[in-house]
Image (cartoon, helix red, strand yellow):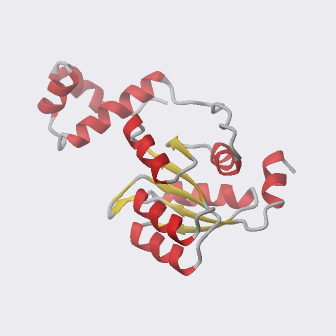
Amino acid sequence: MSELETAVAELPDKSLLLLDDDAPLRNRLGRALESRGFAPTLVETVAEAIGAVRASPPAFAVLDMRLEDGSGLKVVEALREARPDARVVMLTGYGNIATAVAAVKAGAVDYLSKPADADDVARALLAQGVPPAPPENPMSADRVRWEHIQRVYELCGHNVSETARRLNMHRRTLQRILAKRAPR
């Protein structure tokens, strides 16, 4: 039994809410956290998550920041009202300082970029007052750059010219970057 599994086994309440609109990621992470000893409830929307919190407030939550029907921060607020001692970790594919600050102010204990390793998520959930160790496999600088470009592109309504202008980049260079797959 690993150190994480032992720590989870000693918990009095192992209930966990996992909110993500990406079904393969949600299912994979749910299975991985279940194998580490948590009892996950998987939901896809903010509305489902708030319903699950009202029905049975979990001790832990792993929430996606951006969803089709709103923000995971609404679920953090609902969870804080229903169960103030719940430990929440926010996940996002668009990591930036502003959203990290918003998540922590709302009550999240940590903020991780997707794709997050299940061990990193479990460590963040279990960390008590001590910042978790840096991830074993952090995103590469190329991946961080690509994520940032994708985020600005999305915020500009998928307008290549406007995105290139805001990034101070030549339009053709941006088109070549957007045509490629995401780096690892």
Give the x, y percent position of residue 121: 63, 47
Q: Is residue 40 left or right of residue 81?
A: right
**Vertical order, 92 against 29 (above or below):** above
Residue drawn at (37%, 39%) of the image: 98
Residue drawn at (64%, 31%) of the image: 134
**Vertical order, 47 against 170 (above or below):** below
Residue sitting nearer the eye, 83 or 182: 83
Q: Quadrant of the rendered structure where residue 119 is?
A: top right
Give the x, y percent position of residue 77: 45, 63
Q: Outermost residue, right direction?
A: 1
Residue drawn at (60%, 55%) of the image: 29
Residue sitting nearer the eye, 91 or 79: 79
Q: Is residue 96 visible?
A: no
Give the x, y percent position of residue 19: 49, 62
Residue sitting nearer the eye, 147 or 134: 134
Residue drawn at (49%, 30%) of the image: 184
Q: Quadrant of the rendered structure where residue 55 is?
A: bottom right
Residue sitting nearer the eye, 116 or 70: 70
Give the x, y percent position of residue 177: 29, 26
Q: Outermost residue, left direction?
A: 161
